[in-house]
Amino acid sequence: MTRRCFLIVNPTSGSYSQKTVDRIMAGLRERGLAPELMPTGSAADPALFAARLCAEHSDPLVVVAGGDGTVNGVLNGMVPGRATLGVVPLGTANVLAQELGISSVVDALDRLARGTTRPISVGEIERDGEKRRFLLMAGAGMDSAVVRGVRLSEKRVIGKGAYLLSALRVLLSWDRSELRVTGGGRSLSCHGVIVCNAAKYGGNFVLAPEADLFSPGFQVLCIEGGRLAYLKLGLMLLSGRGAPPRCVTSFAATELELSGDKAVQLDGDYFCCTPLHIRTLPELVRLVV
């Protein structure tokens, strides 16, 4: 029996083209699936689409063709235990595809056809009563300030280069303030923190080798010091070395409290500022692997 699926695409994603979408739709049909195309028109649409599909269907197969931001939006509309999520890598970045080892659009379509799934755990932050889920990571500090400072006009023209320009601006106007991180039996002050629900960060760079999408809990990396600390961390990522530098304290946790006043990013998009609470949500949805 042909399985119906719902293809959510973001027309504003970095590598979007109608030709590519047509190829994905045709590829799904060739593999025995019956896709329904759902293009987004605003940043709110991925969550709204996912919520509607969960309300109207039993275990809908929701396929996201876009970047990590679109995947995050869909994730935030899903009802726990009520949907299956698949991903076809498009967009400026898709760390989830890197995490799963998806090498191409064709590879993603083949995986959807096989239909092998595993339940995944995600993170959830809460601030002033508002909640938001994240799949890959949450960060507070320099990386979040960089994300907040990205200019859409630059991103449209130079793609990932817009993040480099934002980083240069952040370095020039350096914020020396600290935040306090409490959780996992620890309480410490640091300049920034990255709460990892997955091993990879910013592409194919392994930042948190002990983090696992399929197990509840996070690997938490607290960065102490100034610009030099982030330079050392960046060199670690580029070199592929597994051990973090001394300026980084790493530990496991399932819940965290973050105080202070720092920008916060979720899955590569700016969301809010600290203080906030973070917790893990076990087995929220099933993911096509």
Image (spheres, rainbow, N blue to C red):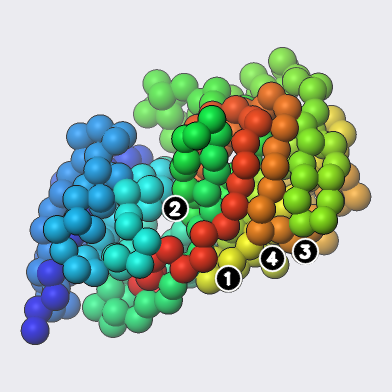
Q: Which mark is residue 242?
A: 3
Q: Would you identify the image quadrant in which residue 32 lies?
A: bottom left
On screen, residue 216 versus residue 20, left or right, reads right
Q: Is residue 184 visible?
A: yes
The reply to whether residue 17 is visible in this rendering is no
Q: Which circle marks residue 94 in the picture? A: 2
Q: Distance from label 4 to label 2 (Cα)?
A: 18 Å
Q: Residue at x 74, y 61 (%)?
A: 252
User: Residue, x 50% and y 45% (percent of image)?
Assistant: 267
Circle 4: is it few (<14), some (14-19), or many (20+) Cα within 10 Å? few
Q: CA distance from mark 2 to mark 3?
A: 22 Å
Q: Which mark is residue 209?
A: 4
Amino acid tagged 3:
Gly
Residue 27 left/right relative to 184 = left
Q: Nearer the viewer, residue 222 or 132?
A: 132
Are the residues at dot 3 and dot 4 in contact (C-beta closer than 8 Å)?
yes
Spot occupied by residue 151 in the image (x, y as percentages of width and height)? 47, 22
Neighbourhood count class around disc 2 (C-alpha, 10 Å): few under 14, some 14–19, many 20 upward: many
Give the mark, 4 or 1, whose residue is nearer the N terminus.
4
Tag 3–tag 1 contact (CB < 8 Å): no
User: Measured from the top left, where is residue 97 in percent x and y?
Assistant: 44, 61
Q: Earlier in the sequence, mark 4 or mark 2?
A: 2
Mark 3 or 4, nearer chain start: 4
**N-term mark: 3 or 1:** 1
Toward which corner of the image does residue 180 lie, by quadrant?
top right
Helix, strand or loop at disc 3? loop
- SS label for mark 4: loop
The amino acid at mark 2 is Asn
**Residue under numbered circle 1:** 215
Say what amino acid the circle numbered 1 marks: Ser
**What element does badge 2 sit on?**
loop
